[in-house]
Amino acid sequence: MKKKILFVVTSHDKKGNTGEGTGFYLSEVAHPWEVLTNAGYDIDFVSPQGGEAPVDGLNLGDAANKKFWNDAVYKERIEKTRKPSEINPVQYVAIHYAGGHGAMWDFADNTALAAIAAKIYENGGIVSAVCHGPAGLVNIRLSNGRYLVDGKKINAFTNEEEVAVKLDKVVPFLLESKLMERGAIFEKSGLWQSHVVTDQRVVTGQNPQSAKAVGEAVLSALQQQQAVARLTRYEVKPEYQDQFKKAIRDYVSYAIDIESNIMAEAYYERENPSILWITERWVSIEEWLKAKSNTQSQAVSRLAEMALQTPIKSISIKDLETLSKQQWRKTANIADSQLTIMLFVDAKAGTQQRFKDVYHVAMPQFRSEPGVITYQLSELEEDDTQFVTYEKFRSNAAFQYHLNFPPIRPVIDYLNSSIKKQPFQNGLHNLIEFAPLIRQ
C-alpha cells in the first residue's frame, strides 16, 4: 500500500468582517501535492468541519494548480474532506497544513486537529505548514507539555506581509508574533520571497511562493526517515590487516559511487589498529541489502571468516536531527589533519530524553564551529538508552577548541552524571580514516 499523508485545509470562507471571500490557497495544496504524489504518496484531506473546502487563489494558469483541479480523484477528496473525528493518526507518515487566510480563524483553536498532528509527530512523522498554515501549529502541545514549535526554527506568513496585504487589523492574531510567543525561533526573508526551514521533522514555508519547496523539503525529510544507518566493527588478526583494509576500501569505493548511498567511510582505531569500522547510510533497507549482495561486500564477508579475532559486530542506529547527503559528504581539506571521534553513551534509564534535549540545543552550535566537518548524534535501534556521536574535526586543535566551547558544558555535565558506568571517556574511540580518504 502507498504511504499516506494528511493535508489540512480550512473550512472558513470569510476574511473577518470585510465581506471578502477566502479559503485554502490552491497552490499551497497543489504544489506540495504534485511533489508528494509523484513520489508515490497517497493524500487524504481533513478540515475543521469536513465537507467541501472553500478555495482561494483559483489560478488555473498555473500548471500544478490545473493538474490538481482536473484530477477527478483528488477533486472529489477536496470536495468531501473528512472531519477530524474520522481520522486515525497512525495511518499517516506526515501532516501538512495548507494556508489561505481562512486558516487564521479555524486552525489554531481546533484541539482535535492539534491532537492528530501531535500523534503523527510523536509517532516519528513529519509536520509541515505553509503561509498561514502554521496557524495550525501554534497550539499543538506534545506529551511532555511543550509546544511543538518551542525551540524550533519556524517560518510562516510574516507580520510585514500581513501589513502589505492590509489584513493585519483583520486577522485574529499576527501569525509571526504568535509563533514567537510559543517559543519558535522565527526565520524570514523579504516580502514574497520563497523561504523554507526544516527543524526536527517540522517543515514550514513563508508564503505561496514557498509551497513547492515545502513539498520538496517534506519529501526529503520522509526519505531521510527511511534511511538505513549502520556501524560495523571488525577485530582483525594482525596478519590479515592489510588484506582486510583493501577489501573494505574496495567496498567503500563501490558504495559511494551508487546514487542510493548517502555516505560510506572506513576507519581503524588509533589506540588499537586491529579494530576497523565501517559507517554507512543508505536511502532504504532495500538498497542496503542490495549493496550487501554485491561482489565487494561478499569479498569482505568471505575474508572475515578467516581474518577476524572476534565475530563481526553490526550495530543498527537511528540518526537524530539528520544530515543530508551533501552534508554527510563534506570532506577535510588537503592541509587538514582530520580527527574523527566516535563516543558511545549508555544513559541511565529515564534520562535519555534529557540527553536528547541537551544535544538538541548544542548540536546546531557544534555543527557551526569552524573546525567541525561533520557532527551527528544517533540512537541505537535495539536500546533507546544507548547513543553514539560521530564527530569529525579538521585537526586536533579544532577538537580542543570544541572541548572548551561553552555550549559543550551541559553535555559534559550530563555525561558526568547520567550514564550507567563512569568515566564516559571509556566509550570514546579515536578513529583514523583509511577509506575513501577524499580531500578538497
Image (spheres, rainbow, N blue to C red):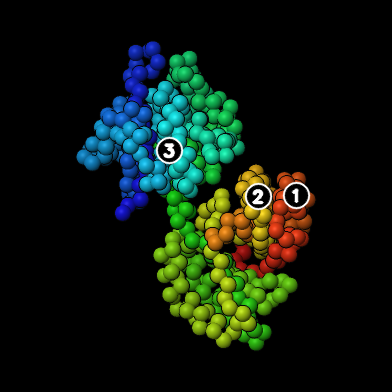
- Disc 3 secondary structure class: helix
Query: At label 1, which amino acid type do we have?
Result: Asp
User: How packed is label 1: few (under 14 Cα within 10 Å), some, or many (20 or more)?
Assistant: few
Drawn side of residue 329 relative to residue 354, left or right = left
User: How packed is label 3: few (under 14 Cα within 10 Å), some, or many (20 or more)?
Assistant: many
Reading the image, the residue beneath label 3 is 116
Which residue is found at the position 33% from the left and 33% from the top?
Answer: 83
- Disc 2 secondary structure class: loop
Which residue is found at the position 57% from the left and 36% from the top?
Answer: 145
Which residue is found at the position 37% from the left and 46% from the top?
Answer: 91
> Of label 1 and label 3, which has the lower sequence position?
3
Q: Nearer the viewer, residue 411 or 68?
A: 411
Quadrant location, the C terminus: bottom right
Determine the CA span between mark 2 and mark 3. Answer: 27 Å
Query: At label 2, which amino acid type do we have?
Result: Thr
Reading the image, the residue beneath label 1 is 413
Front label number (2 vs 1): 2
Total labels: the figure holds: 3
Instruction: Report x, y in % for residue 110.
Output: 43, 28
Quadrant location, the N terminus: bottom left
Instruction: Report x, y in % for residue 128.
Output: 45, 39
- Disc 1 secondary structure class: helix
